[in-house]
Image: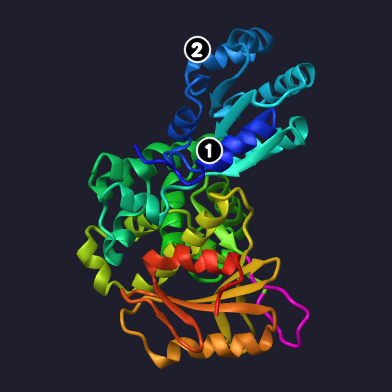
Amino acid sequence: MIRREMTPVLVKLFQQYPFVTMTGPRQSGKTTLCRMAFPHLKYVNLEAPDQREFAESDPRGFLARLGTGAILDEIQRVPTLPSYLQVLADEEGRSSLFVLTGSEQLRISESISQSLAGRTALLRLLPFSLAEREETGAGNAVDDILYSGFYPRIHDRMLEPRQALGDYFETYVERDVRRIGEIRNLPGFRRFVRLCAGRVGQLVNLASLGADTGVSHTTARHWIALLEANYIVFRLPPFHANIRRRLVKSPKLYFYDVGLASYLIGIEHARQIATHPLRGALFENAVVVETLKHRFNRGRRSNLSFFRDKRGLECDLLYETGDGIGAIEVKAGATIASDYFRALKRVAKVLPRISGKAVVYGGADRQFRRDAEVAPLADLPMVLRRFDTRHGP
């Protein structure tokens, strides 16, 4: 069993708060992590109809049966329960009561903000990080990573990624989104999700997405919000600063799991990645979401953005810290070229707060150049740690 990077943070916060609330995609390992971290706590899955009915019909009796604490899985299935948890926490007046998990961040956020504000720590668990994935024995070849992605079950059980990701999409994504979003046009929604996968790394254009899907702009906006609420996609915001340049205002679109994006654009085996026209976009997706995991696994919020001005000057990823900005350029090629550094140098002149520069590329060697650090995908966590400690070049 893989020890998740978030474990120390989870344990520490549970000692400090009455509740810890952990959200994340289905099958990202939330239940496994919580049960490993707190083997002494009772476990209740509110997806089970009998447990859900008990919690809905008699919340006080349900909580009384659990005693001094428990892990409550899929808490969003009983939206009234956090109000009773609030009363319990105030009566107990101590920490380490309940661990709450869920896979629908919008419904959980609404419930928590109304009932448990100030009483719960918030964590987000995404699928395996690069290091966690490697611990399972999975290969670290770039094309294999882009094909198979990071969902724990695929690597723990050595499942065939195409089959597993197809099952995941039909079993979880379509079911959850249809349940909370009242989607009647399922063929259109499937087409919409596949079009999103074909536009990873691009600026979000809802009008274009809607037109290509054959639905209205309003419907496209609703559908992408549902995908975000269920941890399928996220929008990376553009960097904003008071500088004498016109910056783009639209976010860029990424998937929380690059393997799912690969499946949705029709990739059927890892060999297909090498010559696929979207290989660079998928590689960029992997870099961005790995950086997001680096933050979330340490209990931090996202500090990520990208830079692009109206003249076309761009930096793929900006990583802000309290002492500066780490700038990352992403290149899927395996050969280091001099033009890899041009945009970084130009952006650094525009943004004086840039304190570290790195190129993450598809090769295997790590180098320290005068202009920037060059690192393979597997070494991205080391680059981020250097940004965190201000030791970047």
Q: Quadrant of residue 168?
A: top left
Can see residue 282? no
Residue 283 position, x and y percent, is 39, 68
The residue beneath circle 1 is: 103
- 149 up-or-down from 114: above or below: below
- 321 up-or-down from 371: above or below: above
The residue beneath circle 2 is: 50
Of the residues under marks 1 and 2, which one precedes in the sequence?
2
Q: Element under label 2?
A: helix
Name the colouring of the figure: rainbow
Residue 10 position, x and y percent, is 57, 38
Is 238 one of the magenta-colored residues? yes
Looking at the rendering, in which quadrant would you find the N terminus? top left
Say left or right for 315 vs 109.
left
Magenta region: which residues?
237-248
* Residue under the point 71% across and 73% down: 240
- 374 up-or-down from 244: above or below: above
- 351 up-or-down from 227: above or below: below
What crowding class fits label 1: few (fewer than 14 Cα within 10 Å), some (14-19), or many (20 or more)?
many
Is 318 one of the magenta-colored residues? no
Whole-number angstrom distance, CA of label 1 to CA of label 2: 20 Å
Give the mark count: 2
Q: Element under label 1?
A: loop
* Residue under the point 29% across and 72% down: 276
Q: Quadrant of residue 8?
A: top right
Q: Give the amino acid at mark 1.
A: Ser
Looking at the rendering, in which quadrant would you find the C terminus? bottom right
